[in-house]
Amino acid sequence: MATAIITSKGQITIPKSVRERLGVDAGDRVEFVEAGNGVFTVIAATRDVKELKGIVPKPGKPVSVDDMNRAITRMGGRR
């Protein structure tokens, strides 16, 4: 099991074995997600932009600029 020591500034150095398993390096972000009862999961928050491909589906048909402008005008008075 890997361990780390918290500095007086509240900082820790993530052990090399853990960094390698998370796939993180200097400058990358990690998230601490509370799993309950004081237990946290560390998640690598840095991903390659290529992983985002396919998240938003392509529209069924192309939308023209005129159609977009009409939609904006219709929605303009709503908040």
Image (tube, grey):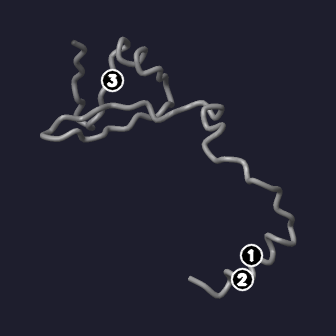
- In the image, what residue occupies the spot 66% across and 37% down? 53
Q: Secondary structure at mark 1?
A: helix
**Residue 14, image x, y percentages:** 34, 22
Q: Which residue is mark 3?
A: 13
Q: Is the residue 67 above or below the residue 28 in the image?
A: below
Q: Is the residue 78 above or below the residue 14 in the image?
A: below
- In the image, what residue occupies the spot 49% across and 31% down? 28
Q: Which residue is mark 1?
A: 71
Which quadrant of the view contains residue 32?
A: top left
Q: Is the residue 46 above or below the residue 23 in the image?
A: below
- Is 65 placed left or right of 18 in the picture? right
Of the image marks 1 and 3, the number of the one nearer the N terminus: 3
Q: Which residue is mark 2?
A: 74
- The image quadrant where one finds the C terminus is bottom right
Give the CA distance from mark 2 to mark 1. 5 Å
Q: Secondary structure at mark 2?
A: helix
Give the CA distance from mark 2 to mark 3. 53 Å
- In the image, what residue occupies the spot 30% across and 28% down? 12
Residue type marked 2: Arg
Residue type marked 3: Thr
- In the image, what residue occupies the spot 15% across and 38% down? 38
Is the Cβ of the residue at disc 1 closer than 8 Å to that at disc 3?
Answer: no
Is the Cβ of the residue at disc 2 closer than 8 Å to that at disc 1?
Answer: yes
**Residue 19, image x, y percentages:** 40, 19
**Residue 51, image x, y percentages:** 60, 32
Outermost residue toward the left in this view: 37
Q: Given this view, does label 1 or label 3 mark the residue nearer the observer?
A: 1
Which quadrant of the view contains residue 42?
A: top left
- The image quadrant where one finds the N terminus is top left
Q: Given this view, does label 2 or label 3 mark the residue nearer the observer?
A: 2
Residue type marked 1: Ala
